[in-house]
Image (cartoon, rainbow, N blue to C red):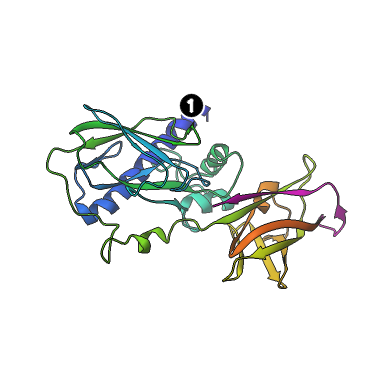
């Protein structure tokens, strides 16, 4: 499959996801004017937009620009209350996408049933080889005074444009709605923002090119906030086994493959450290091959995401 065809498939995938999420939102405020390539909503209504693989994006670093068919553009700066939530949508572990990729099972090769084995490879090309597949979803309120007609949306973070494809919303004529599905209990949106990512550390492993360990043992020193405990987790539990413990000052992690054979990519060893952890530093790292021999030259890259 060519890059152009691959990109076209992803656009269709994203568009259908936008349609489904828009209908989910619309079920609460009235799902009107929704089709495969666009969403329709009245001024003030909440819409859902998929912006691709953007795992480090949240409400505190996202800027939304809305250009209406007529009138001045609108800018939602980071932290704007009209951006209701930003969360990650993951595929079902028994979805055709995941099963076809791991079991090499074909469920059809023609669009729209493009869940054949190669689609998983296509997904990896869009995530730069990372198997922690997700789709970043932004829920936001349209301006209450936006003009009817086609409006385009742009999403940026740190001056970088996140959506290279055009995203268009059909603003329907009519008065602004006062119904917002993401506010309860006198205006609180807390129950919904709980699906957003908590502050966390991303731990990625690095090593000699072409060398993939069978297992990794790593120890991290950490500090905690005033309340709570540490928590270690991962995006794809079907790829590797994660075992960890905490002795009060250090976190010990053991990573092994689920099938007893080495993983195909060092990126698959990625994990998340979260909970009340406020600082995280590598203390020691041991990598082993399938025969239990030590492998040298491995390190970690730790990124803090708030």
Which residue: 80% across, 48% down? 298
- Does the magenta-highlighted stretch encompass residue 303? yes
In-image side of 271 versus 109 (left or right): right
> Camera-side residue: 30 or 303?
303
- Does the magenta-highlighted stretch encompass residue 295? yes
Rendering coords of residue 52 (x, y %): 46, 41
In this rendering, does residue 167 appear at all?
Answer: yes
Q: Which residues are magenta?
A: 286-306
Residue with the most extreme front position: 226
Rendering coords of residue 265 (x, y %): 69, 46
In this rendering, does residue 104 appear at all?
Answer: no
- Indicate whether 296 appears above or below 126: below
- Indicate whether 166 appears above or below 81: above
> Camera-side residue: 38 or 200?
200
In-image side of 27 versus 294 (left or right): left
Residue occupied by mark 1? 4
Determine which quarter of the picture holds residue 224. bottom right
Label 1 Cα crowd, 10 Å radius (few <14 / some 14-19 / many 20+):
few
- Indicate whether 155 appears above or below 177: above
Which residue: 49% across, 45% down? 57
Q: How many marks?
A: 1
In-image side of 237 versus 77 (left or right): right
In-image side of 117 versus 12 (left or right): right
Q: Helix, strand or loop at disc 1?
A: helix
Residue with the most extreme bottom position: 247
């Amino acid at each position: 499959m060519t890059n152009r065809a691959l990109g076209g498939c992803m656009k269709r995938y994203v568009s259908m996801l936008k349609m489904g999420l828009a209908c989910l939102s619309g079920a609460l405020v009235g799902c009107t004017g929704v089709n495969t390539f666009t969403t329709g909503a009245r001024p003030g209504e909440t819409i859902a937009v998929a912006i691709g693989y953007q795992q480090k994006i949240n409400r505190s670093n996202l800027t939304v620009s809305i250009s209406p068919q007529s009138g001045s553009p609108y800018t939602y700066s980071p932290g704007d209350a009209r951006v209701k939530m930003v969360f990650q949508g993951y595929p079902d572990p028994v979805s055709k996408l995941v099963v076809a990729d791991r079991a090499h099972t074909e469920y059809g090769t023609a669009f729209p049933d493009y869940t054949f084995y190669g689609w998983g490879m296509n997904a990896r090309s869009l995530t730069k080889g990372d198997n922690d597949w997700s789709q970043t979803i932004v829920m936001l309120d349209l301006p209450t005074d936006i003009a009817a007609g086609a409006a385009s949306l742009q999403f940026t973070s740190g001056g970088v444009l996140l959506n290279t494809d055009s995203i268009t919303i059909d603003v329907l004529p009519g008065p602004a709605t006062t119904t917002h599905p993401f506010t309860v209990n006198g205006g609180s949106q807390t129950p919904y923002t709980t699906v957003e990512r908590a502050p966390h550390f991303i731990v990625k492993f690095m090593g000699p090119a072409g060398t993939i360990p069978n297992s990794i043992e790593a120890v991290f020193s950490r500090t905690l906030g005033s309340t709570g405990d540490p928590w270690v987790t991962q995006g794809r539990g079907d790829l590797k086994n994660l075992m960890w413990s905490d002795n009060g000052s250090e976190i010990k992690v053991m990573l092994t493959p689920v099938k007893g054979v080495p993983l195909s990519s060092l990126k698959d060893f990625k994990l998340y450290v979260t909970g009340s952890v406020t600082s995280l530093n590598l203390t020691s790292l041991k990598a082993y091959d399938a025969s239990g021999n030590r492998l040298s030259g491995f390190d970690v890259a730790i990124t803090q995401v708030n």
